[in-house]
Image (cartoon, helix red, strand yellow):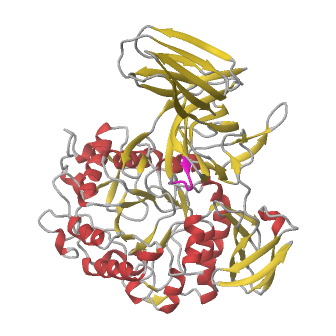
Amino acid sequence: MKKIMKVRLLASAVLTAAGLVVLPCPEIADAAVSQTPPMGWNSYDCLNHSVTEAQVKAAADFMAENLKEYGWEYICIDWAWYYTGNSTGSPTQDGSFNPPLAIDEYSRVLPDPAKFPSSANGQGFKPLADYIHGKGLKMGIHLMRGIPRQAVAANSPIKGSTAKANDIADKVNLCAWLNLMYGLNMNNTASQIYLNSLFELYASWGIDFVKVDDLINPYGAPAFRASEIEGYRKAIESCGREMVFSTSPGATPVANAAQIKKFANQWRMANDLWDKWDNLNTMFDLTNSWHTHAGPGHWPDADMIPIGRLNKHGPTGSERWSNLNSTEKHTMMTLWCIARSPLIWGGNLVENRAEELELMQNSEVIAVNQKSTNARPIVNGNTPVWCADIPGTNDRYVALFNRGGGAANVTVRFNDIGMSGSDTVKVRDLWAKSDKGAFTGSYSMSVPSHGCGLFRMAGTPPESRSAFDTIQAETINTQSGITVEEIGGGGEKIGKIDHRDFAVYAAIDFGDGADGFDARVFADKDLAIEIRIDSADGMLAGTCKIDGTGGGDNWMTVSCSLSVISGQHDLYLIFSGEYDDLADVDWFGFTREVVHTEKKVSGYVPEHYTTRLTEGRITVVPENRWGKYVVTLHTPDGRLVARRNVMEGPVTMALGSKGVYIVRIAGRGTTVEKRVMRY
């Protein structure tokens, strides 16, 4: 049984001199930030908790001068910037809370003014954030989950609440590796008020990125602190400033994938990763487990990149250059890029040598991380092969790896990556920035032990498709987290659609303009579909909010209006909702309703008429509301479809099926003819 359901449009727009600009939908919490994997630097691997304001400014200066043009933009201060002690180990306190933390009157940590002089006199990180923003960069900070034990012992106030610190502390679920904080009892509403007050403060400083530690517990139960993760997300949403939300450490349970990608923008797949081959080797299996959950606004995180000068002030071992050899460093960067992990550099930026910059300044390699979709392993085991799609093309990014102890021949078959085995495929080596030639059927190379190859493989460009034809949903060019399934009774659909999954359809021709969207959908849960152009964060033409049926086997046809899309584009359908397995989609298409031509047929025209077309109906509005006129609706061959005698004011008439109509308006000694197309 088919069901026609009215769809509410959730889109806002502003009119500029260049035309209509559609703004992102504010109801999607993670839609504005982290549309591609964040790129930046974090102080932990090189400077531990002893990092100073001068060192942070030096890192920002280096990034702005050497790395910003390649996409690196976040400068992040890791843990315990509020700890007034100095050591190369963990920043712990004794039973008397010494060394003390810098805390305000509302139980909120503040920067240690000895390390961050500009934070004195209640300035917090705002002066430093202003400096970083002045470089065209963004600033991030690390937080430990919970509330300072020091504040709980003093029973300090909570801003905006009559509760105090001791009322909201969870003294049972503690951090296993650091004794600075108690957890939060999220059953007490004052806990959320406390978190909101934290992010109100951080927003006033200008913070753009927050990494919250101990939300994932690798040492015991609960492994996934769901209520607190949700609490931090709510606090970010309440603060009025966009921030990337990163959870730490890992391993995040794959069983919690739907929850974590709903609330966090990135989450760790493993515990702390260091400059050891064993750590890197383990990441092949973890990225394989998590790859279907990567997409705009939510990225599985392989951890910071421990390359360059490490451990200047702890936290592990002596000061050193990375223990990974050159081959392994290229393998790490290649896996992080093809798996679309956030790229957060761990080495001390100002000491980077040419060999570190070669890894950070290759724009062709960075594009694999930032501009691909549907990254996936094609072959697993000791010689993995990964592939990612390139929107708007039939090209692929391909990575070949060798995890073994000796050289190995690794092959990618073009049929396995969605290219015809009979086509000639051009292969470009992205690390070498050189063309390898044209190949048929497959490409092979000898890969050294622990080594890799990274390539762009160019096939036949995609054929253009009309937006006004029925587009079968399964004819997807690339996707994130979506599967193609059979429909009972015949045909195929896309399904297994979770929050923030997306489907991409290449080279869709919208002609002179489309302003409507139709789709056949099965949805027993509420969801929204964003219609975007050319990228996952491209122009938002509209967002259709669909009310689920609540169960049953009811397919429904949904329709909604859009801002006009014209020309040829890649189409992105981005799905969002509260639950997993949101919907199935059978087909979709676009419509257009425009007045094509207007001409005076006879007589003098003292009256002017405007015409509006919406959802299959034409409305004729006279300039003056008084006066008789007649409206007739014809097919191009002259067949009368409808006639209305109007005494005064506007009139609305149904156009019926899609096609071309002639509208004649006769009144006060004149006849005006309009040619109308309903696509």
Q: Nearer the viewer, residue 455 or 208?
A: 455
Residue 364 coordinates in the image, percent (x, y): 58, 76
On the question of residue 312 being in view, the answer is: yes
Q: Residue at position x 31%, y 77% from top? A: 56
Residue 417 coordinates in the image, percent (x, y): 77, 64
Q: Is residue 322 magenta?
A: no
Counting labels gives 0
What is the residue that sits farthest to the left in this orientation?
121
Q: Residue at position x 42%, y 65% from top? A: 177
Q: With 141 as the anchor, is 532 left or right in this view? A: right
Q: Nearer the viewer, residue 613 or 29?
A: 613
Residue 359 coordinates in the image, percent (x, y): 54, 83
Q: Is residue 116 above or below residue 184?
A: below
* Most common SS among magenta residues: loop
Q: Is residue 338 above or below residue 156?
A: below
Q: Where on the picture, by quarter, is residue 27? A: top left
User: Where does the C terminus fall, quadrant-wise?
Assistant: top right
Residue 167 coordinates in the image, percent (x, y): 26, 42
Q: Residue at position x 42%, y 24% from top? A: 605
On the question of residue 525 being in view, the answer is: no
Q: With 85 as the anchor, is 597 left or right in this view? A: right
Q: Where on the picture, by quarter, is residue 460? A: bottom right
Q: Which residues are magenta?
A: 532-537
